[in-house]
Amino acid sequence: MTIDTFSSQDYRARLDELAHGHAGIRRILDETGYPPFWERPAGFEGLVRIILEQQVSLSSAFSVYRKLKTALPELSPGAVGKLTDEGLRSFGITRQKARYIRILSEEIREGRLDLNALEALPDPEVKKQLTAITGIGPWTADIYLLMGLHRADIFPVGDLALRNAMKGAGFARPDDDHPTLEKKARVFSPHRSLFSFLLWHWYIRTHNIKLPG
């Protein structure tokens, strides 16, 4: 089984390939330039950061993540397991997300989840295993697949900015629902991850959003 991934070395060439067959992609690429190579660390630290990013601004999530990393330079399941709930919340983590992070650390420490093993599994199986963990829904699993494992054909339809960008950039209608957006995004398979990157980049540029870090 071959697992298709992209990297910082080849993602621009892949975007060029995508643009060659789609005038809309070429237009956005010419307008905005190449997106940054966004990534999150593969493994526990990356998943924790994505959990912190659930339903909040990236700036807010990064502020909490930076405080956590300052206190725990080695952000590992074992290190988190030594903290009390109050200890986690002292970094600005909400009660709910502190619970999610603690559950994730327990699942890994007790051997029910092997993040290293996910790298050899197909996308649906990775998503199945991750979403079985309390606090990890489809959006979190998709972002981990895309930015942590750099899988090439991921479209995180649960992301509000991505949906708005797809509509605003002319790839969908304003009233399109989630299933319709997913169907329209299939046109860009097997490069939906880079389609997502380009849409986010367009959204950030057109809305003058400043990213943290």
Image (tube, rainbow, N blue to C red):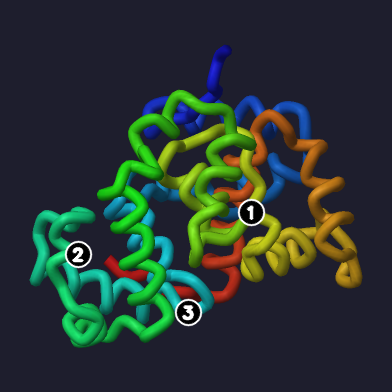
> Label 1 sits on what residue type?
Pro
Determine whether 44 is above or below 212 in the image.
above
Left or right side of 194 for 23: right
Q: Secondary structure at mark 1?
A: loop
Residue 204 makes an appearance in the image: yes
Q: Secondary structure at mark 2?
A: helix
Would you name the residue on which mark 2 appears?
A: 80
* Numbered disc in front, either 2 or 1: 2
Residue placed most toward the observer, 129 or 58: 129
Query: Which image quadrant is residue 62 in?
Result: bottom left
Q: CA distance from mark 2 to mark 1?
A: 28 Å
- In this image, 190 relative to 67: left or right? right
Decide: few, some or many residues near mark 3? Use Cα within 10 Å; few <14, some 14-19, many ≥20: few
Residue 156 numbered tag: 1
Identified by mark 3, the residue type is Val
Circles 2, 1 touching at the beta carbon (< 8 Å) = no
For marks 3 and 1, the one nearer the N-term is 3
Badge 2: residue crowd in 10 Å (few <14, some 14–19, many ≥20): many
> Image point 21% across, 86% down: which residue?
86
Q: Position of residue 204 (x, y in %)?
A: 53, 67
Q: Which residue is mark 3?
A: 56
Q: Position of residue 61 (x, y in %)?
A: 36, 75
Q: Residue furthest front?
A: 110
